Each structure stands twice: as C-alpha cells, then as structure tokens.
Image (cartoon, rainbow, N blue to C red):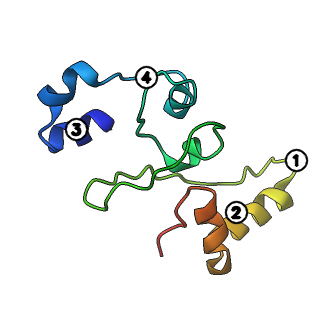
C-alpha cells in the first residue's frame, strides 16, 4: 500500500535510496527505536507504540482503508458479549470512541 502511495505521487525513484519497507512488526516500532525517521502505517497500529507519535492522517486523496467485517459464531461461548461488542462499535453514539482507537466507524 505504501509503495502505491509513493508511486502515485511520482516519488518512487526520488525516494528509492531512502525507503525501507518493513514486514513482520509495526513500522512505528522502528521509529521508536530510531531506525527510521518516518513510517506510514494504520493509525490503530501506531497509537499503542511507546516512543512513536502520530503526526496525522494522510490527506483523503491518498488515504487507503482496510475494511473489516465482524460476525459472531453461532457456537460462541460468549455470544452475548460478542454481540454487545459488535453493537457497541456500530452505534452512532460511540463514533468518537471508535475514532479515538484509530479506526473509522462503519459506513452507513
């Protein structure tokens, strides 16, 4: 995804020598350790990393979203709890809390 953003901005060649693609751990951890100066990653993954600071979201024209689905298994041992969590996250009155966690509420 980040490679596509760089490509769409026409900066692939210009940034090639200074770009490091990381895999297997949150890129924000590399920022916290001082290995890289800037990382692009999902906000909800950046927020819990001590030593990394969220500079802000990308502008809408560069933003890419990962859509998630939720479901509750019929055989779930905690079906009521799972259903309550699903309803909580989708409730309009909880939009601010969902966003505070670095996620966007479900589209209506």
Front one among 17 and 26: 17
Residue for badge 2: 86
Give how far across and how far down residue 41 sits, in percent. Answer: 45, 40
Residue for badge 1: 77
The residue positioned 83% from the left and 56% from the top of the image is 79
Q: Secondary structure at mark 2?
A: helix
Where on the picture, by quarter, is residue 40?
Answer: top left
Nearest to N terminus: mark 3 or mark 2: 3
Q: Nearer the viewer, mark 4 or mark 2?
A: 4
**Furthest residue to the bottom?**
93
Task: Please give the label number shown on residue 6.
Answer: 3
For label 4, the crowd category at 10 Å Cα-Cα, with few meaning under 14, some 14 to 19 and many 20 or more, is few
Give how far across and how far down residue 43 sits, in percent. Answer: 51, 49
> How far is disc 1 from disc 3 in space, using C-alphas?
45 Å
> How far is disc 3 from disc 2 in space, using C-alphas?
35 Å
Q: Nearer the viewer, mark 4 or mark 1?
A: 4
Nearest to N terminus: mark 1 or mark 3: 3
Compared across the picture, whether 61 is left or right of 70 comes to: left
Residue for badge 4: 22
Nearest to N terminus: mark 4 or mark 1: 4
> How far is disc 4 from disc 2 in space, using C-alphas?
32 Å
> How far is disc 2 from disc 1 in space, using C-alphas?
15 Å
């Amino acid at each position: 995804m980040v490679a596509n953003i760089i490509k769409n901005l026409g900066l692939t060649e210009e940034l090639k020598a200074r770009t490091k693609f990381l895999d297997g751990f949150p890129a924000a951890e590399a920022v916290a350790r001082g290995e890289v100066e800037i990382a692009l990653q999902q906000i909800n993954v950046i927020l819990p990393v001590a030593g990394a600071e969220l500079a802000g979201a990308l502008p809408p024209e560069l933003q890419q979203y990962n859509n998630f689905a939720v479901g509750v298994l019929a055989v779930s041992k905690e079906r009521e709890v799972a259903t309550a969590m699903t309803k909580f996250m989708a409730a309009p009155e909880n939009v601010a809390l969902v966003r505070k966690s670095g996620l966007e509420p479900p589209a209506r």
